Image (cartoon, helix red, strand yellow):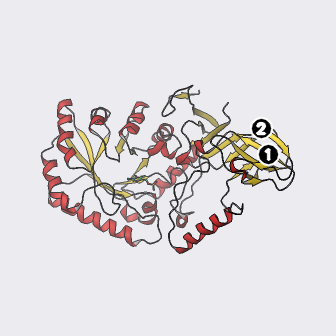
Amino acid sequence: MAGTWIEIDLDSLISNYHEVVKHLHPESRCMAVVKADAYGLGAVQVALALERVGCEAFAVTKVEEGLVLRKHGIRGLILVLGPSTEEEWPKAIEAQLQLTISELSFIAKLNDVCSDLHKEVSVHLKLETGMGRTGFRLSELEDLSKSLNSAPQLKIMGVYTHFARAAQRDKQYTIEQYKQFRSLTVRLEELGIRPAWKHVCNSAAFLDYPEWHLDFVRIGTLLIGHYPGPGFTGKLALSDPWIAKSKIVHLRKVAKGTKVGYQSIYRTKSVTQLAVIPVGYADGLGIAPHFVPQGWFDFLKIIIKNFLALFGVFLSQERVELKGRTVRVAGKIGMQLTVLDVGMQDCALGDEVRIPLRRTVANPRIHRKYKQDGGILAERILEEGVSPVCKEYSQLD
Ligand SMILES: *Cc1c(COP(=O)(O)O)cnc(C)c1O
């Protein structure tokens, strides 16, 4: 049994899905965003569980992610949100993935690949309205419609855009993006392009703008039990499907003043016990996306934090939970080992510790256990010496 693992409660995931559906406009449908291995939960198990309860559409960023879902039996609509490459198209077309078109020069080429295969491909047009990433702008729409008119193998199923600041307090930017989307789609219609579906909402916009649910909402964050930002807490009854755990694999009683870890930045303040757990930053522990200050107050907080660290006070030190009690990480988190200062509380080798592992950065090699109806439904394990990504799922009973 691995010393570090993640338990994923599929019942919680499903209940989050039902919560989303409950708040969905009756004419809209939920497209479950399972990109990046379903934000770390495991794309295959998440999609299988959601498909079983009626979810009809899924979204991923890359073709390879979509192929993995098909290979494991997902039958619903699978939309690839990111740009795809020519080499990927034949497989994507065979697997009936729906592709996003955001690059003019790809249209004729994609059409040729389809003709060679005697197949059609369903596509969604991505419109750029303020994310500044991928998509067509107003000035390109005329050329877009011309290219599409000479690409009969492309079935234009959808048109969409993505919000850059829907989770922020200031709503004006998002409203501008939506207006922009509306005028771009009107222009497309004038040019004779009338996709069946329109979709714009991510989790934050889904909660804030029920009138924008349109034909699909694209939901990731809420399904995995998170709110898109502090202002959204409690808007749905979400439950958290994710628990990361590790076991104590080394335990010693030490004297006051014992130095711990790289650079000896931590010293014990009294006689205490140091426990080691087999998990570190290579597994994602202590890793977070770069924080960009949003104004002077945030900036000040960063300065103060760094200033205190100079004197050995670490405000943001990770905390874990041992037998219901909060315990501090002692010193720097190592690559694959982390030390805990557990005090003199009663504990032993093999005791379980709950660790704060961020789901999107949790190493995919970590053993995942899927629970449903009180039992373990499936496990995802790393086979010896083999790359873990989308390795087989050993179905237990
Ligand atoms: C990730 C993503 C989503 C889902 O966003 P959440 O806020 O996690 O619900 C929707 N649309 C696109 C294009 C995305 O990349």
Image coordinates of residue 338 in percent, x first then y, are 69, 44
Q: Nearer the viewer, residue 22 or 41?
A: 41
Position of 373 compared to 56: left or right? right
Q: Is residue 14 visible?
A: no
Where is residue 247 shown, x and y percent of the image?
72, 39
Compare marks 1 and 2 and give the one earlier in the sequence. Answer: 2
Name the spot of residue 394 as percent of width and height, x first.
55, 27
Q: Write the residue at 68% across / 35% down.
A: 3
Q: Secondary structure at mark 1?
A: strand
Examine the rendered structure and indicate whether residue 43 appears above or below residue 204: above
Q: Residues within 10 Å of mark 1 (few under 14, many from 20)?
A: many
Write down the quadrant of residue 80 in the picture.
top left
**Residue ID for mark 1:** 274
Say few, some or many: other residues with alpha carbon within 10 Å of mark 2 (under 14 / 14 to 19 / 20 or more): some
Q: Is residue 331 visible?
A: yes
Q: Quadrant of the N terminus?
A: top right
Asked whether the beta carbons under mark 1 and mark 2 sit within 8 Å of each other, the answer is no
Looking at the image, the residue that sits furthest to the front is 263
Which amino acid, mark 2?
His
Residue of label 2: 250
Q: Quadrant of the C terminus?
A: top right
Ligand 1 near label 2 (Cβ, under 8 Å)? no
Which of the 4 quarters of the picture holds residue 305? bottom right
Count the marks: 2
Marks 1 and 2 sit apart, C-alpha to C-alpha, by 8 Å
Quick check: 126 left or right of 383? left
Label 1 beta carbon less than 8 Å to ligand 1:
no
Question: The disc labelled 1 sits on which kind of residue?
Answer: Leu
Element type where label 2 sits in the image: strand
Residue 108 location, quadrant:
top left
